[in-house]
Image (cartoon, rainbow, N blue to C red):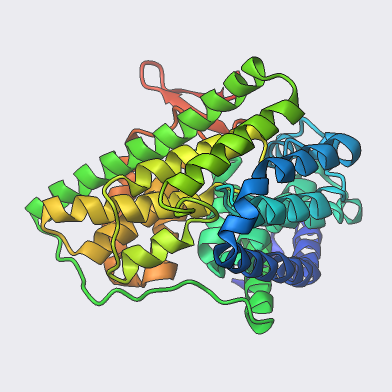
Amino acid sequence: MIKSIATLPKPFLKEMLGLVGLALPIGVAVGVVDVIFGKGLLFLSEYRDQHLFLLLPFLALAGLVIVFLYDKLGKEVRQGMGLVFQVGHGQKDKIPPILIPLILFSTWVTHLFGASAGREGVAVQIGATISHYCRKLVTSQEAARHLLIMGMAAGFAGLFQTPIAAVVFALEVLLVGTLRYSALLPSLVAAYVASWTSHALGLEKFTIVLEETLTITPLTLVKLIGLGLIFGLVGNSFAYLLGWFKPYLSQKLPNPYFRIAFIGALLSICLMIGHVGRYSGLGTNLIAAAFSGQTILTYDWLLKMIVTVISLSAGFQGGEVTPLFAIGASLGIVLATYLGLPVLLVAALGYATVFGSATNTFWAPIFIGIEVFGPDNALAYFVTAAAAYMVSHRHSIYSYQKVVMTNLEDMTVNQVDFKK
């Protein structure tokens, strides 16, 4: 082994050791900011739930504040995850540091006043911005891309404390169908350090160890494939609706101030009438209900999807992943009643697989399932993720994501750009 390492080019070894060294402070820094963001978000979400009737009527005003801040301070960073992807693909050169305070504050405001959004995209942007700031310390463009991947992994891991899922997500999400293995080791270090840092500072991890282990039989295999296809279609539908409704709203309501105020006012009314804020915020209330035996309505997953798509399309800030977890878990509870499978397991499969389909990732949802719900049903996560992957690739919540596709007629490999 030592002999094989010695044969590696010295510039490569030097660069790799440098990246691993940078992974330590990057992981700590990202973990600290993730804690500030995550704890602040949990506090504001709880405060909103306690004062919903006081805060929800001002959602339109909160939206105006968000648009004003981005208009005056952050025109370069208003694309959010799109900017991260553009830098990762070499289409843009930098991520301005102003992104971090803007996305933190605007996401807090979004959740405080009751819009539906997530947090993972914010954490990934935080990590990418911090790591990208270190790009002057490396000499090659490839190393700079590795830094970006390290930061994305650290951001995901610091917030969710699922470091393996975070690493494979960061490795596969920029260019689906490929894995940049040379970024694996420094990304692992950054992700674990960020996860340990956030845990040490008191940010709690969501985890439920499922007691039942599913035995794979021909019948259960068919059921799992069917579930995977359904979850895949739902995740793909979320991505399609988000990709369609954003430009549609921009075309019909071109003034961003009027757009967010008008949609914010409508959302305030609908969210107040529709189960009194049940579909506001992250969706952790639906996740908790799904895994604690509380009531899940047959249409919870659909309304959560619609409200999230409308909120994000209007200009409210936040990620998409936690709402996707909520959509998948809620749908899983509904589907389990018809399939004769363990209810909590199907909810867990939906939790992971809908996320994977909407983000066009395969390995990330498998490891999300393993790290959040335990390894006993790893094969079930694999089967549903594989089935969902068959109906993915057509749409993604990340419009600047690229997918490597193989032409089966001549076996040529092409990149598909969702932005085109």
Residue plotted at (40% across, 62% down): 287
Percent coordinates x, y for residue 109 in the rendering: 71, 53
In-front residue for pair 59/10: 59
Res 346 → quadrant = bottom left
Quarter-wise, where is residue 166 in the image? bottom right
Q: How many marks?
A: 0
Residue 31 locus on image (x, y percent): 71, 70
Name the residue rendered at 80%, 39% in the picture: 77
| Quarter where residue 263 is shown | top right
Residue located 73% across and 35% down the image: 79
Instruction: Give percent across and percent down for residue 210.
Output: 29, 73
Q: Quadrant of the N terminus?
A: bottom right
Which residue is at a point 67% across and 52% down the rendered structure image?
Answer: 122
Note whether 204 is above or below 408 in the view shown.
below
Q: Position of residue 328 (x, y in %)?
A: 36, 51
* Viewer-nearest residue: 232 or 275: 275
Nearer to the camera, 295 or 50: 50
Q: Is residue 308 above or below residue 351?
A: above
Q: Is residue 89 visible in this depiction of the protein? A: yes
* In the depicted structure, whether residue 313 falls above or below residue 381: above
Q: Is residue 34 left or right of residue 205?
A: right
Quadrant occupied by the C terminus: top right
Asked if residue 397 shows in the view, the reply is no
Left or right of 411? Residue 159 is right
